Amino acid sequence: MARDFNRTDRIADVIQKELAQIIHQEMKDPRVGLITLAQVKVSKDLSHAKIYVSVMLEENAAQALETLNKASGFLRAQLAKRIQMRVMPVLSFVYDDTTIKANRLSKLIDDARAKDKSSEEDDSEKT
């Protein structure tokens, strides 16, 4: 039976949890703002970790990512203090816009439904 939860997935989960705490508690930079670590993907050789970040305000996304990528050395060092690993992955932060796209799509669906409903009401009034 194949394993459903391999080592890289477990490491990614630990990195995500610890990194969220470090950013929230120890990183004092206001340019980061309100962020969510959506997902962490770790390479098979554990040398790189790609962290997908979603930002509360879309206009602050570029500045938050730039700040996080510049602070990746500090964040990596803090992770190394909390997690015992032979090699700590190099961190790279990537903007995750799936929640923003989902909200836009949901709004479009709601608008289309409202438009259909109003046109049905207009048709029923004419007959």
Image (cartoon, rainbow, N blue to C red):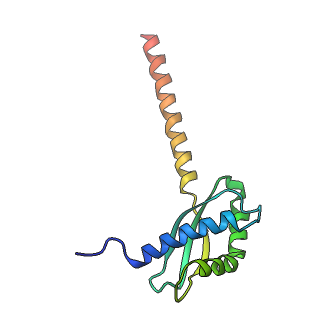
Q: Residue 90 in the image: state x and y as whole percent.
A: 59, 82
* Viewer-nearest residue: 97 or 6: 6
Q: Position of residue 36 (x, y in %)?
A: 60, 59
How far across and how far down the image is residue 35, in percent? 64, 59
Q: For residue 54, which quarter of the picture?
A: bottom right
Residue 74 drawn at (x, y percent): 70, 78
Left or right position of 20 against 60: left
Residue that extends furthest to the left in the rendered view of this protein: 1
Of residue 32 and residue 78, the one placed in the foreground of this image is: 78
The correct choice, above or below, for 9 with respect to 36 in the image is below
Q: Quadrant of the N terminus?
A: bottom left
Task: Tell me what residue is drawn at x 55 percent, y 53 percent.
Answer: 99
Location of the C terminus (image quadrant): top left
Count of all numbered marks drawn on residues in the image: 0
Q: Quadrant of residue 28?
A: bottom right
Q: Is residue 67 above or below residue 59?
A: below
- In this view, the residue farthest toward the bottom is 86
Picture residue at 54% right of the left edge, 68% below the top: 16
- Viewer-closest of 46 and 59: 46
Above or below, 69 against 34 in this view is below
Q: Seen in the image, is 83 located left or right of residue 22?
A: left
Name the residue at 47% across, 86% down.
45
Position above or below: 58 against 74: above
Residue at 43% across / 73% down in the picture?
9
